[in-house]
Amino acid sequence: MTQKAFPLAFVFLVSGLVAGCGSDRPLRTPEVGQAIRTELQPPTPVKPVVAVPAYISESLAEPAPAAPAMAPEPRLDLLVNNAQAREVFLAIVADTRYSMMLHPDVAGTLSVTLRGVTVTQALEAIRDVYGYDFKIDGRRITVFAPTLQTRIFTVNYPHSQRVGNSELRVAPGASLQGIDNGASGSTGGTSASGGASGSEGSRVTTSSKTDFWAELSTAVQGLIAGSKGSSVVVSPQAGIMAVRAMPDELRQVDTFLQAAQIAIERQVMLEAKIVEVELRDGYQSGIDWSGLRNSGNSTGAMGVIGGNTGAASTNTLVRGVQPNIPGFVAGTALLADGVSLPAAGSGLFGLAFATEGFQAVLGFLETQGDIQILSSPRIATLNNQKAVLKVGTEDFFVTNVTGGSTGGDTTGTTTMPSITLTPFFSGISLDVTPQIDGGKNIMLHVHPSVTRVDEKSKQIDLGSAGSYALPLASSSMNESDTLVRIQDGNIVAIGGLMQIESSGKTSGLPGTTEWGALSNLFGNKAKSGRKKEVVVLIKPSIIRTAQDWEAQTRRTREALDDMDAVRARVIRIDGTVGTLPAKNTAQ
């Protein structure tokens, strides 16, 4: 008993000593602002634990750690009434780390009332009202008079022009030459190639042309058009633009170029899956998308993407993905804020939803039929730039025959006709043009096309001249073209592209299948048909860069500095510098 009691007493004694020592150490909770600043600091590079020879460590210098954030700049109150501009500028930098240089033409008077501002904010406010431009170079500030100045801007964009066309044509009469992939609506069916150009039932063409440098030069010239003596010099090859204008106009040009640079540099990652679903017997009318609501991990809205109205329109499927939509019934009050439906007319079925990924949608499609992924492209493109993917083959087919004759019995001369061959594409093509707004929404111009071209021989009777057997092209096409608006990271589905494949099978006794009457008596003929629907799934994602996160971090840090700012100086009308009472120093 004594041997067991001694260890137990020792444990209680040690626990009491530890508790007594811990009670003498107060708990410290850092300030909220300092804790947030610490989290905003860039991570310090971790030195590898693996032993490295000394000569390698000396030759491979480690990158310098990121500079720590500077302390918040002191704030000041600027109270000026009809004072000389030169005296005001010199008073602003008095007792600070900055030095001031004034242009000889800086003159005039100022009347300003600013409270709780930094040196930079005070100079910016005076510049916006009175036009005195300034430049900060380290600790040196130079103030210029409001006169014509020249500034060189750098614009990072290639010197190139891009032209894109997307076209869809439906001809109820004779078929048109070639195959053109195009816009708005959907078609499914079979057409044959030929040389005639018949009447068109409908035709919609979408064209895009990108000449960035010409547009940029025209826009900048419009911004400085009101200034006498202003000019713009553009060098697309060097990627620079020189502008001579007044300071306020130069600031407008700078703001415009920064906004343009941000817009053209934004990128979108496009993930798409073109799926062919062979429908089961219970889904011969098409995929029943209402069953998607039972999956439990998908939310969204659906409706009709506009029919052939003859006018360009934007089909808004989702402004904000709405959860728990009962049955996805189009036209109900729950969908009124999320779906814009056409008043009348048929159109392409569209669905936009948020889900965990493609696997959830593919799993749902497997419940409707046997699926086959025809293509799974993944491509990145810039904002407002067309991305085109084309996978397949091109074969040449006869599209026109001219000339040709057969001589008489005496000469026996035969002239061969002139044949025109045209390439026909067979495969999958997809072109997408994204447009990113200021938030998280992306507008997509989508044009998927699945084309299959087979050779079909046709006999042309020329009377006494004989006959020609022409190998023509028979095209089976499933394509659509539409505009849709969707949130970043969500998936848009385009369906309704159906086609029917029929096949026949004949069986019977040997030798009787070629005779009509006998084959009916001693054989069997069976015909079967299959319905297939092509579904296009597209997931656009905005590519975030380090600059985006740095800008957000900088705005957060500036907001914290503004909250914790302490005004230490007051500049009054005569430019004297004083100190606030102690009770007013912390605001």
Image (cartoon, rainbow, N blue to C red):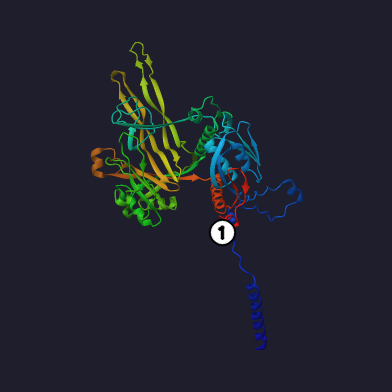
* Residue of label 1: 32
Rendering coords of residue 114 (x, y %):
54, 45
Rendering coords of residue 364 (x, y %):
38, 52
- Residue 527 position by quadrant: top left
Please report the residue visible at 44 percent of the width from the left and 39 percent of the height from the top. 435
User: Can the viewer see residue 23?
Assistant: yes
- Position above or below: 3 against 253: below
Please report the residue visible at 56 percent of the width from the left and 36 percent of the height from the top. 109
Q: Amino acid at mark 1?
A: Val
Please report the residue visible at 68 percent of the width from the left and 48 percent of the height from the top. 64
- Front residue of this view, candidates 459 and 219: 219
Dot 1 lies on which element? helix
Quadrant that contains the C terminus: bottom right
- Front residue of this view, candidates 413 and 219: 219
User: Can the viewer see residue 288?
Assistant: no
Quadrant that contains the N terminus: bottom right
